[in-house]
Image: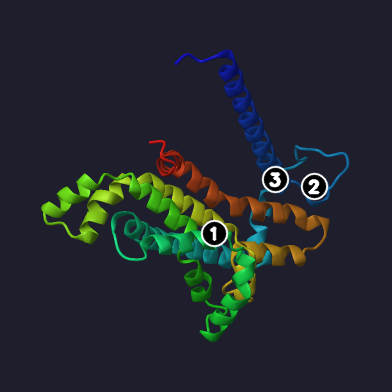
C-alpha cells in the first residue's frame, strides 16, 4: 500500500512531537546535572545561567555525608529488585493460568482482577496499613515488599502475551513428557521474554518512584527508600546552599532507572507490541 501525502505528513508530525519531547526531557536532565555542579549561590540566581562558574564535583558526595543517603539507596535497590522479581513470578504464573487452563470461574476471576485496576490505590491504603500493622510489618522490608508482590496490570499483560503462544507448542511439549512447570520455563518463558522485560521495567519504575506507601510503613532511616529519604532531606535543607546537593541526589537517584531502560529498551518495545497483538 502506497504512503499517501496525508500519511507522510502525519508521520512527520508525530516524529516532530516525539523529537520535541525528547529534547525537553534531555534539557531537564542536563539542567539538573549542571545545577548539581554549581556553587550554592548560583542555582537560584537571576538571570538563569546554565553553565556553572566552577564545577563543584564534591556536591555528589555531600548527600552521603549529610544524610543516610547510601542506606536509602540500598533500601530502594533491595525493595525494587525484590518486588520486580516477585511480580515476574506471580504475574507470569497467573497469566499462564488464565490463558492456557480451563476451569470453572476462570473468566469471572480474570474480570475481578481487571476490576481492581479501576480502584485507586489510595482507597485501600488504610485497610492495607491496618493489616500490615497487625502483622507487625511496619518499619520492615516485609511491609514494603509483600503488598507490592503482584499487580493486576502485570497479570493482564502476561495473560495477553501468553495468549499469543500457539497451543500446538504446548501440546507437543506435553506429548514429550514435559510437565506444567517445565512447559512454562522451557517453552513459554523464552517466547515471552519481551513482555517479561516490559513488566520488569514497569514494576521497577513504579516501585522506585513510589512515595506514599513507603512513607506510611517506613518511618526510620533503616527502611526509608529514596523518595521518602529525598523528601526528608529536602525538609531539612540548609537554604540555597543545599540546592546543588539535592540536585546531585536527584541525579544519582535517576541513574538506575535510566540504566534499566537503556538495557531493556529493545525488549520493552517487543513486549508492548506482543501484548498488543502487533507481533
Q: Which residue is mark 2?
A: 43
Q: Which quarter of the rendering shows the N terminus?
A: top left
**Could you give the CA–CA distance between mark 1 and mark 2, rounded to whole angstroms?**
41 Å
**Could you give the CA–CA distance between mark 2 and mark 3, rounded to whole angstroms?**
10 Å
Q: Earlier in the sequence, mark 1 or mark 3?
A: 3
Q: Which residue is mark 3?
A: 32
Give coordinates of residue 234: x percent, y percent: 74, 62
Give coordinates of residue 108: x percent, y percent: 42, 63
Q: Are marks 2 and 3 in contact (CB under 8 Å)?
A: no
Q: Which image quarter: residue 28? A: top right
Label 2 SS: loop
Work out whether residue 116 can be spotted.
Answer: yes
Left or right placement of residue 164 versus residue 1 in this view:
left
Which disc, if any, is residue 117?
Answer: 1
Residue at 70%, 46% in the rendered image: 37
Label 3 SS: helix
Give the label, 1 or 2, closer to the camera: 1
Give the label, 2 or 3, closer to the camera: 3
For the residue pair 71 and 37, the one nearer the viewer reads as 71
Residue at 45%, 39% in the rendered image: 269
Q: Which image quarter: residue 235? A: bottom right
Q: Is residue 125 above or below residue 13?
A: below
Residue furthest right in the image: 46
Give coordinates of residue 118: x percent, y percent: 58, 59
**Could you give the CA–CA distance between mark 1 and mark 3, rounded to whole angstroms?**
34 Å
Amino acid at each position: 500500500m502506497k504512503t499517501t501525502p496525508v500519511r507522510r505528513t502525519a508521520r512527520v508530525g508525530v516524529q516532530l512531537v516525539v523529537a520535541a519531547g525528547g529534547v525537553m526531557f534531555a534539557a531537564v536532565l542536563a539542567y539538573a546535572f549542571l545545577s548539581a555542579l554549581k556553587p550554592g549561590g548560583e542555582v537560584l540566581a537571576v538571570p538563569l545561567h546554565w553553565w556553572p562558574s566552577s564545577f563543584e564535583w564534591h556536591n555528589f558526595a555531600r548527600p552521603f555525608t549529610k544524610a543516610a543517603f547510601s542506606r536509602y539507596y540500598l533500601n530502594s535497590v533491595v525493595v525494587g529488585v525484590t518486588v520486580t522479581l516477585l511480580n515476574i513470578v506471580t504475574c507470569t504464573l497467573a497469566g499462564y493460568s488464565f490463558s492456557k487452563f480451563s476451569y470453572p470461574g476462570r473468566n469471572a476471576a480474570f474480570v475481578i482482577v481487571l476490576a481492581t485496576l479501576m480502584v485507586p490505590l489510595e482507597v485501600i491504603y488504610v485497610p492495607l496499613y491496618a493489616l500490615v500493622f497487625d502483622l507487625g510489618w511496619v518499619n520492615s522490608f516485609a511491609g514494603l515488599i509483600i503488598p507490592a508482590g503482584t499487580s493486576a496490570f502485570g497479570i493482564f499483560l502476561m495473560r495477553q502475551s501468553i495468549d499469543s503462544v500457539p497451543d500446538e507448542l504446548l501440546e507437543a511439549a506435553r506429548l514429550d513428557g514435559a510437565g506444567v512447570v517445565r512447559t512454562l520455563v522451557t517453552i513459554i518463558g523464552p517466547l515471552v521474554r519481551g513482555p517479561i522485560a516490559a513488566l520488569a521495567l514497569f514494576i521497577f519504575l513504579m516501585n522506585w518512584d513510589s512515595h506514599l506507601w513507603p512513607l506510611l510503613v517506613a518511618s526510620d532511616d533503616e527502611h526509608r527508600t529514596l523518595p521518602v529519604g529525598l523528601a526528608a532531606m529536602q525538609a531539612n535543607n540548609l537554604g540555597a546552599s543545599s540546592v546543588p546537593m539535592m540536585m546531585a541526589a536527584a541525579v544519582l537517584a535517576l541513574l538506575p532507572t535510566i540504566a534499566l531502560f537503556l538495557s531493556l529498551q529493545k525488549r520493552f518495545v517487543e513486549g508492548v507490541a506482543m501484548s498488543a497483538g502487533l507481533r
